[in-house]
Amino acid sequence: MVPKRKSDATEEFPQDPIIIEQIFMKKKSELIFSAVQVPIDILMIFLAAISAFAIRDIPEILALKPKLYIFPFSQYIQMVFTVMPLFIGVYALEGLYNIKTTRKFWQEALKIFTATSIALVVIIVAIFLKREWFSSRFIILAGWFLAVAYVTVGRYVIQRIQKYILVKKGTGVYRVLLIGSNGKMKKMGESIKANPYLGYSIVDHISTGSIRAIKEIRKEKGIDEIILCDSTLTDSEQEKLVDFCAINNIAYKFIPTALQTARFETGILNGEPIIEIKNTPLEGWGRILKRIYDLVGSTLLIIIFSPIMLLIAILIKWESLTERKPGGPIIYRNERIGSNGRKFYVYKFRYMKWEFCTDPNTSEGRKAIEYEKELIAERSVRKGPLYKIKNDPRKTRVGNFIERYSLDELAQLFNVWKGEMSLVGPRPHQEREVEKYNEYHRRLLTIKPGISGMAQVSGRSDLDFEDEYKLDVFYIESWSLWLDALISLKTVKALLRKRRN
């Protein structure tokens, strides 16, 4: 549920760069090991297939059953490479590419068995429908057994290496804060300390859920996860704690009492049921898939729209020359706040007169900012921290057209290509707008901003900020590639409608 309150879980802005760097290094280590799993799985499946082919004579040697026919090795290898993507796809769907170091090996082994069996069933059905492909039941069964064994061994080796680096180097360790003073929490703390291979390091243990105390601990030691076991916390206090964790990219887990949530993932830690609130699917492989979608999509769109962008650039320059003001930029950079509070420059085709697109540190730039403040006070039609100037007198003739049809934002495709923005996400806001946020609004800064988003396809810039926030939080909590594709298609339709002045 989207909160409708002000939170006292205030956070300094921007975040501590040391903490951001620590988080980045841990995530980088996990992503590397997660990415390595894919080629290792492919290698293990390939070796299992080769081994199954090599031992195909065993039934005949043992006089169990003669070979019915002989088929060439090259044809067999071709079929192996054909079905390889099926195995990797099923493994991914079964969650076998989880990036966390805290996963349990026996759970991973069970998933390998399940996923390999599912892939085998699909192959058997395909062979049944078209027998000329392959008909050796021994190789199929031997391949299944060997694939489970080889992939499990490969995963075990990777995990042992990862655990070794975790314990010896401290890379990938999850810094956990325990909240609560009952016997269960004490026992869990003792178990985590006694088992470093769990992948946790307790940074502190406090008895209350004080946001102020948690901030001090995070500032001094860093926090990756919070585990709560305190039934005395009110719903309001827990909501503030959830908001704080979401804003600061901290995993929030609790030993359940009466609290329930629709967005959770259950598990077992030290024999106790534990629930983790999922802030967004945009973690781990979700983030990787979204980046691939953005990189491919922005590249294709830059190629497709390059003639239009070239024409816009020519028109902007031509208008500047006709007005005898040739010094104006074609594309201007406007500083915005991105994910985790990082500042970056968003690109736009200039739709305002050149004197209003100058460096804010110059005298002309300061005059432009003062004039903009006057226009906001007199003509802004939006409520909340954002503004929208009605009938903006600063626009040029070309600028009025390209801004009305959002063509000025085509330049932001280069922001997406560089990785500063996404094709879909919350809109990037200026620092002065972010400073007016209520604390819970900072959830918008937990993912990359986007060119388009839920708000743009639902009401564009005509929505009040609070309504826009609710739509963006829904997107953050419900992200999927399908949702990105759907919003992208709806964006095309929305672009065909004129913006209101």
Image (cartoon, helix red, strand yellow):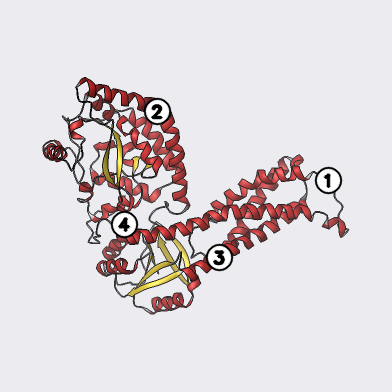
Q: Which residue is mark 3?
A: 161
- Quarter containing the N terminus: bottom left
Front in this rendered view, residue 64 or 290: 290
Of the two numbered discs 2 and 3 on the same chain, state the one appearing first in sequence: 3
Q: Give the label, 1 or 2, closer to the camera.
A: 2
Q: Do the numbered discs 1 and 2 sit on residues whose CB atoms are within 8 Å? A: no
Q: Do the numbered discs 1 and 4 sit on residues whose CB atoms are within 8 Å? A: no
Badge 3 local density, few (<14 within 10 Å), some, or many (20+)?
A: few
Q: Residue at x 56, y 56 (%)?
A: 37
- Quarter containing the C terminus: top left
Of the two numbered discs 3 and 1 on the same chain, state the one appearing first in sequence: 1
Q: Give the label, 4 or 2, closer to the camera.
A: 2
Q: Which residue is mark 1?
A: 70
Q: Is residue 445 left or right of residue 489?
A: left
Of the two numbered discs 1 and 4 on the same chain, state the one appearing first in sequence: 1
Q: Give the label, 4 or 3, closer to the camera.
A: 3
Q: Which mark is residue 376?
A: none
Q: Which residue is mark 2?
A: 306
Q: Which residue is mark 4?
A: 247
Badge 1 local density, few (<14 within 10 Å), some, or many (20+)?
A: few
